[in-house]
Amino acid sequence: MKKIAIIGAGISGLFLANLLEQGKSHSYKIFEKKNSLDLNERYGIQLSVNSINLLNEIGFQKINVSNICFPKKVNFLDAKNSKKICDIDLSQFNNQSNRYTTLKRSKLIEFLLENIPKEKIVYNSDLVDIKDQDKLALSFRDKKNEEFDYLVAADGVYSKTKQILFKKDGLPKYFNSIALRGNIENFENFDISLYLGPNFHFVIYPINQNKEFNFISIVRKELIEEEISNRNLFKDNTFINNLLKHISSKSHLNLDKKVKEIKCFPIFVSKKFQIPKSKNIFLTGDAFYSFPPSFAQGASQSIEGAKDLFNDLKNNSTNYYKKRILKTKQINSRSSFNHFAFHISNPLNVFFRNIFLKHLSKNKRFLENYLGKIYNN
C-alpha cells in the first residue's frame, strides 16, 4: 500500500484524508505545523452546492442542523444608505439534498476530524526539505525524517512546501487589499447581505441558527513592502480600528459598534500556476492557487480540488492539474471581476453598474453561465 504525506490540516487536507479513509487504497499521514486546531473560532465560510454534494459523500448531511444555515438569496445593497439594489436567488441552484450552506469554519473542521484517527495527524511538524529520490524523503524542523510515495501540499496560500519547491517563485503577491473579519449578533436578515461601497465591500451572513453572523470586508489598501512584511501591523488595534471606522463612516450601519472579535489580514494571491517536476507531488487548495476572495469559492474549491486529486490517485490517472487549472481560471476571472465591480467609486459608474446588476441578477442565461457552471459542475 502506497504512502501519502499530507502537509496541512486545513479543509483541503482533511477532506482528502476522509476520502482516503473511506477508500482504504492508500495509507496517509497529515503533518500540521500548529500545535492544535482551533475548534472555537467563530468565523464563517460559504459552501455552494458543488462542495456540499461532495461533503455529503462522507456524511455531512448528518451534521446538526442548528450549526448550519441555508441562505436563499444574495442581497446587493448600497453601503452608504443600505438601499437594496437587487438580489440573486441562490436556491435555483439547489437540489433536494444539496443546498447552498453557511456555517462556522471550525464546525466544518470539527466534522472533518471525526473520521480521522488521531494518530494520523502529527502536530508541530514544520516541513523544511524535500528530496526526490526513489521515494520522497521529507525532513521536518524537529529532525524527523520520513519517506513517502506521494506528497500533497495543502498548507495554504503561504505554503512552505511551495517555497521549498519553487523558492521565491513560490511566494504569493500582495493583492493591494486587506480583509477584516469579525462577528455580528442578531442581524435582521438570514440571507447573504452584500454591501457595495467605494473601494470596499462587506458581506454579512448567518453561520448557525443561533442568530450569529459572520462579517467579512475587503478593503483596497496599498502598502509599501515594509508594511506588508510587518505581521505585527495587522495585529495592531489602532490600525484595525481605523480601517473599520473608515468603512463604517461610509456605511449606513454602525459597524464599529456592531462588529466584534475583529481581525485583519492582508490578501495574497498566486502569481501563476506552478506544477512540480515530480509526478508524485501535488498542490491543492490555496497551496495550488489562491485567487481573490470576492466569489466566495475558497472553501468549496479546496473540497473540489481534494476530490479531483483523490480520483487521480484512485484511478492512477494524470488529469488532476489539467482539470484544476481549467476550473481555477474560471473562478479567478469571476473573483477578479467581482472585486472590480464591487469597489467602483465613481458615482456615474456606480449608477450604470447598479443598472447592469438589476438586469443580470434576473437573467437566467447569464446566471447559469456565471454561477451555475461553478455551482453545479
Image: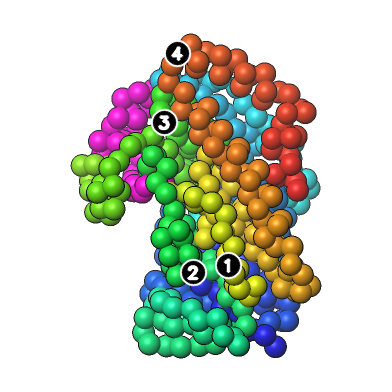
**Which residue is denoted by mark 1 in the rendering?**
276
Chain-order first, disc 2 or disc 1:
2
Residue 253 drawn above or below residue 37: above
Cα–Cα gap, marks 2 and 4 = 46 Å
Residues at marks 2 and 1 touching, judged by CB atoms closer than 8 Å: yes
Residue nearest the observer in this picture, 322 or 312: 322
Amino acid at circle 3: Phe
Chain-order first, disc 3 or disc 2:
2
Residue drawn at (43%, 20%) of the image: 345
Residue 267 seen in this snapshot: yes
Q: Position of residue 44 (x, y in %)?
A: 49, 50
Cα–Cα gap, marks 3 and 2 = 35 Å
Residue 110 seen in this snapshot: no
Q: Position of residue 331 (x, y in %)?
A: 62, 44
Identify the magenta region. 241-267
Mark 3 or mark 2: which is in front? Answer: 2
**Which residue is denoted by mark 2 in the rendering?**
165
Amino acid at circle 4: Pro
Mark 2 nearby-residue class (10 Å; few <14, some 14–19, many ≥20): some
Q: 219 left or right of 245?
A: right
Residue drawn at (42%, 38%) of the image: 218
Residue 278 drawn above or below residue 375: below
